[in-house]
Amino acid sequence: MWRQAGFLADAFAVFKEHNYSVDLISTSESTVTITLDPESAVDADGSRFIRFIDDLSGLCQVEVKTDCVSISMVGNAIRTILGKLSSALDLFQDRHVHLVTQSANDLNLTLVVDSEHADSLVRKLHQTLISSQADNRAEFGPSWSEMNRTAGTARGSPEWWHARAPDLLEILGQRECAYVYDLNIIRKAAQRLNALRTVHRVLYSVKANDHPRILQVMAQEGLGFECVSIAEVEHVLETVPGGQPAEILFTPNFAPREEYEKAFQAGVRVTVDNSWVLREWHGLFTHKELFLRLDLESGHGHHRKVITSGKESKFGISLEHLGELSDHLQKHDIRVTGLHAHTGSGVTDVSVWQEQLRRLLAVLPRFPAVKVLNLGGGLGVPDRPEQSRLDLAELDKLLHASLGEAEIQLWLEPGRYLVANSGVLLARVTQLKDKGNYHYVGIATGMNSLIRPALYGSYHDIVNLSRLDSPSTVPCRIVGPICESGDVLGESRLLPPTCEGDVLLIANTGAYGRVMASHYNRRIPAEELFLAS
Ligand code: LLP
């Protein structure tokens, strides 16, 4: 072909003569690689194809490869994000790629590989480009399911706040932003957990949301409290009428010695998660009862920063230290009455707690005084409308199967499950801007009120509450007013055409929302309000 004018014309004349339409093409100085759609290439007895190859062989050396598949990444202006596709292209590293083309209309990038690799490559590409792309969503746009659903509709039925839209707008009044909670949602979640027949006690993990009204509802529903700082312990004792120390489990990690002293003085139950503490401060623990938090070696969670078990985590006592620890406990008359394990937060696979239970039961013989196995919290809630809810009935069944006849109480200490769905963050639209590839919708509060999207890439559903019934057609990047490029609350979200003053609703923000807020930039985080029930 090198400098031979008309070679391609001659070759394509043969395609035309035999009525073959070219699908993909790439060329070099000496080689032309072409794909034909198998449906057009195959004829009943193969004779047309043989004649075609014969004729083509008069012009060049022909090699036919069958059993190939073309895999296309399809998207608008794909050339502009080639750099972002590097992780996807890495997947092809060990595969024989026969051809790469980037379509002239800039709508797809296609690679042709042997068909045996196609399924696994497509699965991995999907995982790399779509499922795990919380941070990259700006480039990849809304997902198909997001584009095809009605705003705020989860798993087929509307979210609770749909019906309460007028109440929510009314309670916000003239404010720029606010967290608004519905306590009934919390009550129902607490009742679902209390109905688990294998679980003897549910403690509310106060860190998820420590608003006094929420703590009071937990107490009314008969839940205890799990606290991770002495300040949380004091807060519960002060704000829950009739709050008893016996209802509180103190589960600190790398806390100063005086917090343990105060906890014992207050009469709350203490969990220790470091054998160093028991050795170095043994005077503090002699003749005491306590729970031990163990690291059962496998961690789970919605993000690596919330996995609290396993080699990389700072929590818990390693199983390998239990031998020497037992001797020490005996020597100082420290009675272990409970074992505790918490693998991480935002877990959706119920078999994780069964596995925890299994592993705790395996170490139980070392601790004859143990009456309680605390399986921790971590119960996940669906972030995206297409995700399903945690199957509590299945959890109950699995725990029951593993517990058998063991004379032991099972405890859980969830935070998120109880409160996440009860809260929404409302914020008024401040400004709009079109810049680069984005249509920006600015709102009155951002990562100072809700840091989860910036910190974990967390997904929170976002709708325009002022225009709930208008079709969501405009892809938007929803940002706050904080001086950080990471102050993005939602990437590539579809909203109706939106105006200054509209109220956006950010869903599922009852857990780890206001409690993780800051005054960064001296901006006051959203205050907390409650719907009348
Ligand atoms: N128990 C212990 C010992 C914990 O460390 C935690 C959470 C819980 C219970 C309650 O976990 P939950 O049921 O809420 O998943 N800020 C993160 C979550 C960090 C959770 C830390 N520990 C987030 O926004 O996702």
Image: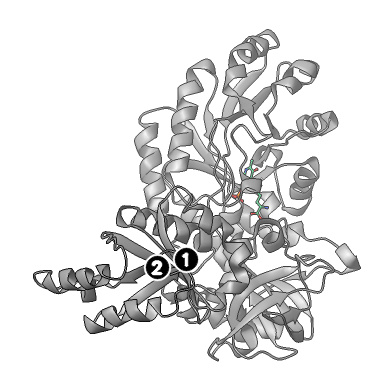
Residue identified by numbered label 2: 32
Q: Residues within 10 Å of mark 2 (few under 14, many from 20)?
A: some
Examine the rendered structure and indicate whether residue 150 appears above or below residue 131.
Answer: below
Q: Nearer the viewer, residue 501 or 373?
A: 501
Residue corresponding to mark 1: 28
Are dots 2 and 1 in contact, CB under 8 Å?
Answer: yes
The answer to whether residue 507 of the structure is visible from this angle is: no
Q: Quadrant of residue 272?
A: top right
Quadrant of res 228: top right
| Quarter of the image that includes the N terminus | bottom left
Q: Residue 346 appears at what percent x and percent y?
A: 56, 52
Quarter of the image with the C terminus in it: bottom right
Q: Position of residue 434 (x, y in %)?
A: 72, 85
| Numbered tag placed on residue 19 in the rendering | none
In-front residue for pair 103/249: 103
Q: Nearest the camera: 130 or 15? A: 15
Give the amino acid type for the residue marked by disc 1 in the picture: Ser
